[in-house]
Amino acid sequence: MVRRSWLDTQAAKLLAESDTAISPVDAEAIGNLSGQIQLLLDNVEQVVLGKRDVAHDCLIANLSGEHVLLEDVPGVGKTLMGKALARSIDGSFRRIQFTPDLLPSDIVGSSIFNSTANRFEFHAGPIFSNFVLADEINRAPPRTQSALLEAMSDNQVSVDGITHDLPSPFMVIATQNPFEFEGTYLLPESQLDRFLFRLSMGYPDREFEQQILSNHRTGEPVDDLRSVCEPETHLYMKQLVRQVEVDEAIANYIMDIVQATRQSENLGVGVSTRGALLWYRASQANAFIDGRSYVIPDDVKALAVKVLAHRVKPVGTMGLLQRDELESMIREIVGTVPMPE
Protein backbone atom coordinates (compact mmCIF):
# COMPACT_ATOMS: atom_id res chain seq x y z
CA MET A 1 0.00 0.00 0.00
CA VAL A 2 1.22 3.51 -0.78
CA ARG A 3 2.37 5.20 2.41
CA ARG A 4 -0.49 7.08 3.98
CA SER A 5 1.74 9.94 5.15
CA TRP A 6 2.72 10.78 1.57
CA LEU A 7 -0.86 10.46 0.36
CA ASP A 8 -2.25 12.61 3.15
CA THR A 9 0.30 15.32 2.37
CA GLN A 10 -0.51 15.31 -1.33
CA ALA A 11 -4.27 15.15 -0.73
CA ALA A 12 -4.19 18.06 1.69
CA LYS A 13 -2.13 20.09 -0.76
CA LEU A 14 -4.54 19.48 -3.60
CA LEU A 15 -7.70 20.00 -1.56
CA ALA A 16 -6.37 23.35 -0.39
CA GLU A 17 -6.26 24.51 -4.00
CA SER A 18 -9.20 25.50 -6.16
CA ASP A 19 -10.69 23.13 -8.74
CA THR A 20 -9.15 25.23 -11.49
CA ALA A 21 -5.63 24.64 -10.20
CA ILE A 22 -5.18 20.97 -11.05
CA SER A 23 -2.74 21.27 -13.94
CA PRO A 24 -0.19 20.49 -15.23
CA VAL A 25 -0.41 16.72 -15.01
CA ASP A 26 1.44 15.15 -12.08
CA ALA A 27 2.85 12.03 -13.74
CA GLU A 28 4.88 11.08 -10.66
CA ALA A 29 1.84 11.13 -8.38
CA ILE A 30 -0.16 9.01 -10.83
CA GLY A 31 2.65 6.47 -11.03
CA ASN A 32 2.96 6.35 -7.24
CA LEU A 33 -0.72 5.53 -6.91
CA SER A 34 -0.56 2.42 -9.10
CA GLY A 35 -0.07 0.27 -6.02
CA GLN A 36 -3.10 1.83 -4.34
CA ILE A 37 -5.27 1.05 -7.35
CA GLN A 38 -4.20 -2.58 -7.46
CA LEU A 39 -4.78 -2.84 -3.72
CA LEU A 40 -8.35 -1.60 -4.21
CA LEU A 41 -9.01 -4.16 -6.95
CA ASP A 42 -7.42 -6.94 -4.90
CA ASN A 43 -9.58 -6.02 -1.94
CA VAL A 44 -12.81 -6.17 -3.95
CA GLU A 45 -11.74 -9.47 -5.50
CA GLN A 46 -11.46 -11.01 -2.05
CA VAL A 47 -15.26 -11.21 -1.91
CA VAL A 48 -16.32 -10.83 -5.57
CA LEU A 49 -14.31 -13.73 -6.94
CA GLY A 50 -13.30 -13.96 -10.58
CA LYS A 51 -14.83 -10.60 -11.56
CA ARG A 52 -11.79 -8.35 -11.57
CA ASP A 53 -12.75 -6.99 -15.00
CA VAL A 54 -16.13 -5.82 -13.69
CA ALA A 55 -14.50 -4.34 -10.59
CA HIS A 56 -12.02 -2.57 -12.88
CA ASP A 57 -14.84 -1.02 -14.91
CA CYS A 58 -16.78 -0.01 -11.78
CA LEU A 59 -13.65 1.69 -10.48
CA ILE A 60 -13.31 3.56 -13.79
CA ALA A 61 -16.86 4.83 -13.34
CA ASN A 62 -16.24 5.73 -9.72
CA LEU A 63 -13.05 7.68 -10.43
CA SER A 64 -14.82 9.41 -13.31
CA GLY A 65 -17.61 10.49 -10.96
CA GLU A 66 -20.15 8.48 -12.94
CA HIS A 67 -22.58 5.57 -12.54
CA VAL A 68 -23.05 1.98 -13.69
CA LEU A 69 -25.98 -0.14 -14.85
CA LEU A 70 -25.45 -3.84 -14.08
CA GLU A 71 -27.75 -5.86 -16.30
CA ASP A 72 -27.82 -9.53 -15.38
CA VAL A 73 -29.79 -12.35 -13.79
CA PRO A 74 -30.33 -12.29 -10.00
CA GLY A 75 -27.81 -13.79 -7.63
CA VAL A 76 -24.51 -13.24 -9.48
CA GLY A 77 -23.01 -10.65 -7.11
CA LYS A 78 -24.30 -7.25 -8.23
CA THR A 79 -25.14 -6.09 -4.70
CA LEU A 80 -21.92 -7.61 -3.40
CA MET A 81 -19.91 -5.55 -5.89
CA GLY A 82 -21.42 -2.32 -4.58
CA LYS A 83 -20.82 -3.26 -0.95
CA ALA A 84 -17.23 -4.29 -1.61
CA LEU A 85 -16.42 -1.01 -3.38
CA ALA A 86 -18.00 1.00 -0.57
CA ARG A 87 -16.11 -0.85 2.16
CA SER A 88 -12.82 -0.65 0.26
CA ILE A 89 -12.84 3.17 0.38
CA ASP A 90 -14.59 3.45 3.76
CA GLY A 91 -17.76 4.82 2.14
CA SER A 92 -21.40 4.50 3.13
CA PHE A 93 -23.66 2.07 1.25
CA ARG A 94 -27.45 1.95 0.92
CA ARG A 95 -29.62 -0.43 -1.08
CA ILE A 96 -32.98 0.73 -2.43
CA GLN A 97 -35.36 -1.97 -3.64
CA PHE A 98 -37.29 -0.47 -6.55
CA THR A 99 -40.92 -1.59 -6.60
CA PRO A 100 -44.08 -0.36 -8.39
CA ASP A 101 -45.27 1.45 -5.24
CA LEU A 102 -41.95 3.19 -4.51
CA LEU A 103 -42.31 6.99 -4.41
CA PRO A 104 -39.70 9.64 -5.26
CA SER A 105 -39.76 10.79 -1.63
CA ASP A 106 -38.78 7.26 -0.57
CA ILE A 107 -35.51 7.87 -2.42
CA VAL A 108 -34.58 11.52 -1.92
CA GLY A 109 -36.39 12.19 1.36
CA SER A 110 -39.11 14.63 2.34
CA SER A 111 -39.93 17.62 4.53
CA ILE A 112 -41.83 16.72 7.70
CA PHE A 113 -43.49 19.25 9.97
CA ASN A 114 -41.95 19.50 13.44
CA SER A 115 -44.76 20.69 15.69
CA THR A 116 -42.36 21.44 18.54
CA ALA A 117 -40.17 23.72 16.45
CA ASN A 118 -43.16 24.88 14.38
CA ARG A 119 -41.35 24.36 11.09
CA PHE A 120 -40.77 21.82 8.32
CA GLU A 121 -37.55 19.82 8.59
CA PHE A 122 -35.92 17.87 5.81
CA HIS A 123 -35.38 14.16 6.45
CA ALA A 124 -32.82 12.79 4.02
CA GLY A 125 -33.61 9.65 2.06
CA PRO A 126 -31.29 6.71 1.34
CA ILE A 127 -29.82 8.44 -1.70
CA PHE A 128 -27.65 10.42 0.70
CA SER A 129 -24.93 7.77 0.67
CA ASN A 130 -21.61 7.36 -1.09
CA PHE A 131 -22.74 4.23 -2.91
CA VAL A 132 -26.41 3.67 -3.73
CA LEU A 133 -27.62 0.36 -5.14
CA ALA A 134 -30.83 0.92 -7.12
CA ASP A 135 -31.94 -2.70 -7.19
CA GLU A 136 -34.23 -3.73 -10.08
CA ILE A 137 -34.54 -0.11 -11.12
CA ASN A 138 -36.90 -0.97 -14.00
CA ARG A 139 -39.58 -2.22 -11.57
CA ALA A 140 -40.42 1.32 -10.48
CA PRO A 141 -42.52 3.63 -12.70
CA PRO A 142 -40.85 6.44 -14.68
CA ARG A 143 -41.87 9.10 -12.16
CA THR A 144 -39.89 7.32 -9.44
CA GLN A 145 -36.97 6.55 -11.74
CA SER A 146 -36.74 10.25 -12.57
CA ALA A 147 -35.93 10.99 -8.92
CA LEU A 148 -32.41 9.79 -9.72
CA LEU A 149 -31.81 12.07 -12.71
CA GLU A 150 -30.76 15.23 -10.88
CA ALA A 151 -28.73 13.23 -8.39
CA MET A 152 -26.82 11.38 -11.10
CA SER A 153 -26.17 14.49 -13.18
CA ASP A 154 -25.45 17.13 -10.55
CA ASN A 155 -24.76 15.26 -7.28
CA GLN A 156 -27.67 17.03 -5.65
CA VAL A 157 -31.40 16.71 -5.09
CA SER A 158 -34.12 19.36 -4.85
CA VAL A 159 -36.99 18.99 -2.39
CA ASP A 160 -39.62 21.69 -1.90
CA GLY A 161 -37.51 24.15 -3.86
CA ILE A 162 -34.42 23.64 -1.70
CA THR A 163 -31.27 22.05 -3.10
CA HIS A 164 -29.37 19.53 -0.98
CA ASP A 165 -25.85 18.41 -1.89
CA LEU A 166 -25.10 14.70 -1.92
CA PRO A 167 -22.00 13.27 -0.23
CA SER A 168 -18.74 12.88 -2.14
CA PRO A 169 -18.00 10.44 -3.60
CA PHE A 170 -21.46 9.60 -4.91
CA MET A 171 -22.15 6.66 -7.19
CA VAL A 172 -25.32 4.88 -8.30
CA ILE A 173 -25.07 1.20 -9.21
CA ALA A 174 -28.40 0.23 -10.75
CA THR A 175 -29.44 -3.33 -11.57
CA GLN A 176 -32.02 -4.89 -13.83
CA ASN A 177 -32.83 -8.38 -15.04
CA PRO A 178 -32.66 -8.55 -18.87
CA PHE A 179 -34.77 -11.71 -19.06
CA GLU A 180 -37.83 -10.79 -17.00
CA PHE A 181 -40.11 -8.05 -18.26
CA GLU A 182 -43.50 -8.59 -16.64
CA GLY A 183 -44.27 -5.66 -14.35
CA THR A 184 -41.27 -3.64 -15.50
CA TYR A 185 -40.78 -0.26 -17.15
CA LEU A 186 -38.18 0.29 -19.85
CA LEU A 187 -35.54 2.83 -18.87
CA PRO A 188 -35.94 5.88 -21.12
CA GLU A 189 -33.02 7.08 -23.22
CA SER A 190 -32.54 10.09 -20.94
CA GLN A 191 -32.03 7.75 -17.98
CA LEU A 192 -29.75 5.33 -19.81
CA ASP A 193 -27.60 8.24 -20.94
CA ARG A 194 -26.76 9.00 -17.28
CA PHE A 195 -24.96 5.68 -16.88
CA LEU A 196 -21.34 5.56 -17.97
CA PHE A 197 -21.40 1.79 -18.52
CA ARG A 198 -23.91 -0.98 -19.02
CA LEU A 199 -22.16 -4.11 -17.73
CA SER A 200 -22.91 -7.76 -17.08
CA MET A 201 -21.50 -9.74 -14.16
CA GLY A 202 -22.03 -13.18 -15.69
CA TYR A 203 -21.76 -16.48 -13.87
CA PRO A 204 -18.39 -17.14 -12.19
CA ASP A 205 -16.14 -19.94 -13.38
CA ARG A 206 -16.70 -23.26 -11.63
CA GLU A 207 -13.54 -23.05 -9.49
CA PHE A 208 -14.49 -19.58 -8.24
CA GLU A 209 -18.09 -20.61 -7.65
CA GLN A 210 -16.99 -23.56 -5.55
CA GLN A 211 -14.75 -21.24 -3.54
CA ILE A 212 -17.73 -18.91 -3.03
CA LEU A 213 -19.67 -21.78 -1.46
CA SER A 214 -16.82 -22.40 0.95
CA ASN A 215 -16.27 -18.72 1.79
CA HIS A 216 -19.96 -18.19 2.63
CA ARG A 217 -20.24 -21.25 4.85
CA THR A 218 -20.13 -19.27 8.09
CA GLY A 219 -21.35 -15.83 7.00
CA GLU A 220 -20.84 -12.93 4.60
CA PRO A 221 -17.14 -12.22 3.89
CA VAL A 222 -17.97 -8.66 2.78
CA ASP A 223 -18.97 -7.83 6.35
CA ASP A 224 -15.35 -8.32 7.41
CA LEU A 225 -13.82 -6.52 4.43
CA ARG A 226 -11.51 -3.72 5.55
CA SER A 227 -10.95 -0.33 4.02
CA VAL A 228 -7.72 -0.01 2.02
CA CYS A 229 -8.10 3.58 0.84
CA GLU A 230 -8.68 6.70 2.91
CA PRO A 231 -11.50 8.99 1.70
CA GLU A 232 -9.00 11.84 1.24
CA THR A 233 -6.81 9.64 -0.95
CA HIS A 234 -9.81 8.56 -2.99
CA LEU A 235 -10.79 12.18 -3.62
CA TYR A 236 -7.18 12.95 -4.54
CA MET A 237 -7.26 10.15 -7.13
CA LYS A 238 -10.47 11.54 -8.64
CA GLN A 239 -8.81 14.92 -8.99
CA LEU A 240 -5.74 13.37 -10.63
CA VAL A 241 -7.92 11.55 -13.17
CA ARG A 242 -9.01 14.93 -14.57
CA GLN A 243 -5.33 15.84 -15.03
CA VAL A 244 -4.63 12.89 -17.35
CA GLU A 245 -3.65 14.31 -20.74
CA VAL A 246 -5.70 13.62 -23.86
CA ASP A 247 -3.99 14.48 -27.13
CA GLU A 248 -6.04 16.38 -29.69
CA ALA A 249 -5.69 13.47 -32.12
CA ILE A 250 -7.35 11.14 -29.59
CA ALA A 251 -10.13 13.65 -28.92
CA ASN A 252 -10.70 13.79 -32.68
CA TYR A 253 -10.77 9.97 -32.75
CA ILE A 254 -13.55 10.01 -30.14
CA MET A 255 -15.53 12.56 -32.13
CA ASP A 256 -15.03 10.69 -35.41
CA ILE A 257 -16.67 7.60 -33.88
CA VAL A 258 -19.44 9.66 -32.27
CA GLN A 259 -20.18 11.31 -35.62
CA ALA A 260 -20.15 7.91 -37.31
CA THR A 261 -22.91 6.68 -34.96
CA ARG A 262 -25.02 9.71 -35.89
CA GLN A 263 -24.51 9.14 -39.62
CA SER A 264 -25.00 5.37 -39.60
CA GLU A 265 -27.88 4.10 -41.75
CA ASN A 266 -28.60 1.46 -39.11
CA LEU A 267 -29.01 3.85 -36.20
CA GLY A 268 -31.88 6.26 -35.71
CA VAL A 269 -30.28 7.84 -32.62
CA GLY A 270 -26.53 8.30 -32.29
CA VAL A 271 -24.30 9.03 -29.31
CA SER A 272 -25.10 12.23 -27.41
CA THR A 273 -22.67 14.96 -26.45
CA ARG A 274 -22.91 13.71 -22.87
CA GLY A 275 -21.92 10.26 -24.11
CA ALA A 276 -18.85 11.68 -25.84
CA LEU A 277 -17.81 13.59 -22.72
CA LEU A 278 -18.25 10.57 -20.44
CA TRP A 279 -16.25 8.42 -22.86
CA TYR A 280 -13.47 11.02 -22.73
CA ARG A 281 -13.46 10.96 -18.93
CA ALA A 282 -13.60 7.17 -18.78
CA SER A 283 -10.56 7.00 -21.04
CA GLN A 284 -8.71 9.28 -18.62
CA ALA A 285 -9.66 7.02 -15.71
CA ASN A 286 -8.59 3.90 -17.61
CA ALA A 287 -5.18 5.43 -18.28
CA PHE A 288 -4.90 6.49 -14.64
CA ILE A 289 -5.65 2.96 -13.39
CA ASP A 290 -2.92 1.67 -15.71
CA GLY A 291 -0.51 4.15 -14.12
CA ARG A 292 -0.26 6.50 -17.10
CA SER A 293 -0.59 10.28 -17.16
CA TYR A 294 -1.79 10.25 -20.76
CA VAL A 295 -4.49 8.51 -22.79
CA ILE A 296 -3.61 6.19 -25.66
CA PRO A 297 -5.97 5.10 -28.47
CA ASP A 298 -6.38 1.65 -26.89
CA ASP A 299 -7.93 3.28 -23.80
CA VAL A 300 -10.63 4.76 -26.00
CA LYS A 301 -11.21 1.70 -28.14
CA ALA A 302 -11.35 -0.72 -25.20
CA LEU A 303 -14.24 1.20 -23.62
CA ALA A 304 -16.22 1.96 -26.78
CA VAL A 305 -18.84 -0.80 -26.59
CA LYS A 306 -19.40 -0.46 -22.84
CA VAL A 307 -19.87 3.31 -23.07
CA LEU A 308 -21.74 3.65 -26.38
CA ALA A 309 -23.98 0.62 -26.99
CA HIS A 310 -26.73 1.66 -24.57
CA ARG A 311 -26.77 5.24 -25.90
CA VAL A 312 -27.80 4.43 -29.47
CA LYS A 313 -31.09 3.27 -30.95
CA PRO A 314 -31.47 1.33 -34.21
CA VAL A 315 -33.74 2.41 -37.01
CA GLY A 316 -37.28 1.17 -36.48
CA THR A 317 -38.78 -0.31 -33.32
CA MET A 318 -36.24 -1.34 -30.73
CA GLY A 319 -36.90 -4.82 -29.36
CA LEU A 320 -36.28 -5.80 -25.77
CA LEU A 321 -33.44 -8.21 -26.44
CA GLN A 322 -31.25 -6.27 -28.85
CA ARG A 323 -28.24 -5.69 -26.64
CA ASP A 324 -26.00 -8.04 -28.64
CA GLU A 325 -27.06 -6.43 -31.91
CA LEU A 326 -26.37 -2.93 -30.62
CA GLU A 327 -22.95 -3.93 -29.33
CA SER A 328 -22.17 -5.54 -32.69
CA MET A 329 -23.16 -2.32 -34.47
CA ILE A 330 -20.81 -0.27 -32.27
CA ARG A 331 -17.93 -2.69 -32.90
CA GLU A 332 -18.54 -2.42 -36.62
CA ILE A 333 -18.58 1.38 -36.52
CA VAL A 334 -15.43 1.54 -34.37
CA GLY A 335 -13.73 -0.81 -36.82
CA THR A 336 -14.35 1.57 -39.71
CA VAL A 337 -12.69 4.57 -38.02
CA PRO A 338 -8.89 4.61 -38.26
CA MET A 339 -7.01 4.92 -34.99
CA PRO A 340 -4.56 7.79 -34.57
CA GLU A 341 -0.91 6.82 -34.85
Image (cartoon, rainbow, N blue to C red):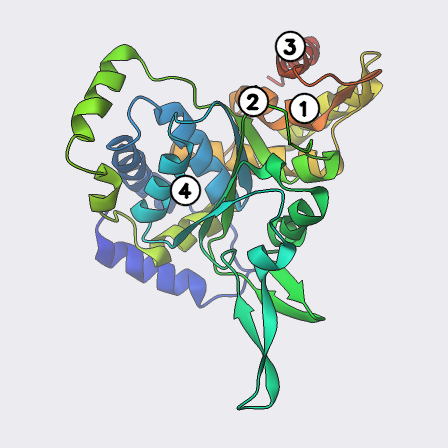
Q: Secondary structure at mark 2?
A: helix
Instruction: Give the residue pinned by disc 1.
Output: 253
Q: Secondary structure at mark 4?
A: helix
Return the disc, 2 or 4, that comes first in the chain's sequence: 4
Say whether marks 3 and 2 touch (CB < 8 Å).
Answer: no
- The answer to whether 126 is drawn above or below residue 280 in the figure is below
- The answer to whether 322 is drawn above or below residue 25 in the figure is above
Q: Visible in this render: residue 244?
A: no
Return the disc, 2 or 1, that comes first in the chain's sequence: 1
Instruction: Give the residue pinned by disc 3.
Output: 328
Return the disc, 3 or 1, that comes first in the chain's sequence: 1
Q: CA distance from mark 3 to mark 1?
A: 19 Å
* Three-letter code, disc 1: Tyr
Say whether marks 3 and 1 touch (CB < 8 Å).
Answer: no
Point out the frontmost of discs 3 and 1: 3
Instruction: Give the residue pinned by disc 2.
Output: 297
Q: Residues within 10 Å of mark 3 (few under 14, many from 20)?
A: some
| Residue 65 point in image, percent of width and height | 53, 46
**Residue in the image at 39% along x and 27% along y:** 75
Say whether marks 2 and 1 touch (CB < 8 Å).
Answer: yes
Q: CA distance from mark 4 to mark 3?
A: 36 Å
| Quadrant in which residue 56 is drawn | top left
Q: Is residue 278 left or right of residue 265?
A: left
